[in-house]
Amino acid sequence: MPPIQIADDDLLYRRLAPGHLYPNGAANSNAFKLNGAPDPQISVDLARLTTVDESVMSAGRPGFRVGVLRVGDVRKLGLEVIHDPTDENASHCIITGNTQRATCTLLAELTKVI
């Protein structure tokens, strides 16, 4: 599948491990870090090309949840969203440009956990 255009109104699904959530169920900044540092290529799924169930099941381990982000909100933080399909996942995208810990916190605040 060739990459497709992503609109500001599109939604993204981010798989969230148990350590990515506060006790109250909200996402924390670790959801957007890799080995404790801001993840420069955050893996997400384009919601219109998948389902919540497919996204969470692709984690391959129990206990994961899904967080939802609106593309326009991500772009307002100065980040880019790129459709990056793989053979296994046509909905795969990456969020690029995440280099600041503060951005990880802002992304977590924008994430609606379902």
Image (cartoon, rainbow, N blue to C red):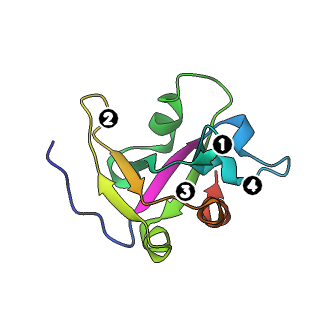
Q: Quadrant of residue 20?
A: top right
Mark 2, Cα crowd under 10 Å, few <14 / some 14-19 / many 20+, is some
Quadrant (top left, top right, bottom left, bottom right) of the N terminus: top left
Left or right side of 7 for 35 = right
Q: Which residue is mark 3?
A: 68
Mark 1, Cα crowd under 10 Å, few <14 / some 14-19 / many 20+, is few
Single out the residue that lies furthest toward the right.
23
Secondary structure at numbered mark 4: loop
- How far apart in space, not on screen, are marks 4 and 1 (Cα)? 19 Å
Q: Which residue is mark 4?
A: 26
At horizontal 47% and vertical 38% (from top left) the residue drawn is 55
- How far apart in space, not on screen, are marks 1 and 2 (Cα)? 26 Å
The secondary structure that most of the magenta stretch takes on is: strand
Secondary structure at numbered mark 3: strand
- How far apart in space, not on screen, are marks 3 and 1 (Cα)? 22 Å
Q: Which residue is mark 1?
A: 36
Secondary structure at numbered mark 2: loop
Mark 3, Cα crowd under 10 Å, few <14 / some 14-19 / many 20+, is many
Q: Which residue is mark 2?
A: 89
- Comes first in the chain, label 3 or label 1: 1
